[in-house]
Amino acid sequence: MTNVLVLVDHVEGELQNTTRELITAGRIFGQVGAVVVGKPGTAEGLKSELAAAGAETIYAAESDEADSLLITPSVDALSGLAAHLQVPVLVSASATGNEVAGRVSARVGSGAVYGITEIDAERNAKKPVFGGEYIVDSGAAGVAPVFTWQAGSIDPEPQDAAGEIQAVELPGAGPTAVKITSFAPAEAGDRPDLAEAKIVVSGGRGVGGSEGFTDVVEPLADALGAAVGASRAAVDADYYPGKFQVGQTGVTVSPNLYIALGISGAIQHKAGMQTSKTIVAVNKDDEASIFEIADFGIVGDLFNVAPQATEEIKNR
């Protein structure tokens, strides 16, 4: 019997690590049902990985047009299953996940809590607010409450399960459905994907310009095999492309190591990286708020500190 539903994140048939986190977190309720939305054959291709992650049942919500419709197939599948099973729903706290959560909660008439980092068997959740300054206890009413999970909040723990596939019928596209007419592949680079990276090196306004990213931030990131991020202030100043923005209105990251260079620590930025396992901050302003959440802080000129660190790492 399924005790919790998890929406599976996958890209071109590749399982995203956030799904493993969701399954691990969801096991607090009992047996996990993983909902796969995509074209026919997607669930079968993910079966072994989902079973190894701990999914007892895999609900295959598949159709030829599932990948060409925006949001609605996931909402249809989750809301139908949640209403029938009357169990909690867990999705990732991404832009897409948050939108799905809102629509599902409206359809089933249950509450939703966004950006949680912990949950217990009684459906009580914890979530950070005000850039991680406070942790609040939250709950959602209804028979099928919806929770969005902040990536990096738990280490995935594999647990072999049956991974039995059950087909779920998806309704056809309605007259108001938004259709995707084409896909443009993301530019592939040599660095890890920002959202999934184990190490992130980010630059802020203190980097001083695009040259600062090229000459200081990127070399340190490459020496560490890290992804590069940027604060909103740096993006707004055209120092670095917006797709690399870390924060409340950008990408949420939770790497093992986060290095902040010249970032003051606005609350919106901290909201997007506060769950990083280890935070290192370099800033010449000893009162910068980034130091409040940093595990290691260096008060100094990043143009001296970062290059020295890069050379030391290269020499090892």
Image (tube, helix red, strand yellow):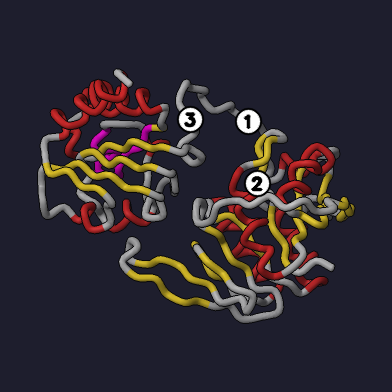
Please name which of the two marks, 2 or 3, marks the residue nearer to the observer: 3
Tell me residue 57's x, y (percent).
Answer: 82, 56
Please name which of the two marks, 3 or 1, marks the residue nearer to the observer: 3
Total marks shown come to 3
Which of the two discs, 1 and 2, labels the residue nearer the N terminus?
Answer: 2
Tell me residue 166's x, y (percent).
Answer: 89, 54
Residue topped by disc 1 = 183
| Mark 1 vs mark 2, CA separation in Å | 18 Å
Tell me the residue at 17%/32% (across/down).
305
| Mark 3 vs mark 1, CA separation in Å | 21 Å
- Mark 1: which amino acid? Phe
Secondary structure beneath disc 1? loop
Residue topped by disc 3 = 192
Please name which of the two marks, 1 or 2, marks the residue nearer to the observer: 2
| Mark 2 vs mark 3, CA separation in Å | 18 Å
Quadrant hosting residue 69 = top right
Looking at the image, can residue 216 be seen?
Answer: yes
Query: Which stretch did the figure color magenta?
Result: 228-238
Crowd around label 1: few <14 · some 14–19 · many ≥20 (10 Å):
few
Secondary structure beneath disc 2? loop
Residue topped by disc 2 = 9
Secondary structure beneath disc 3? loop
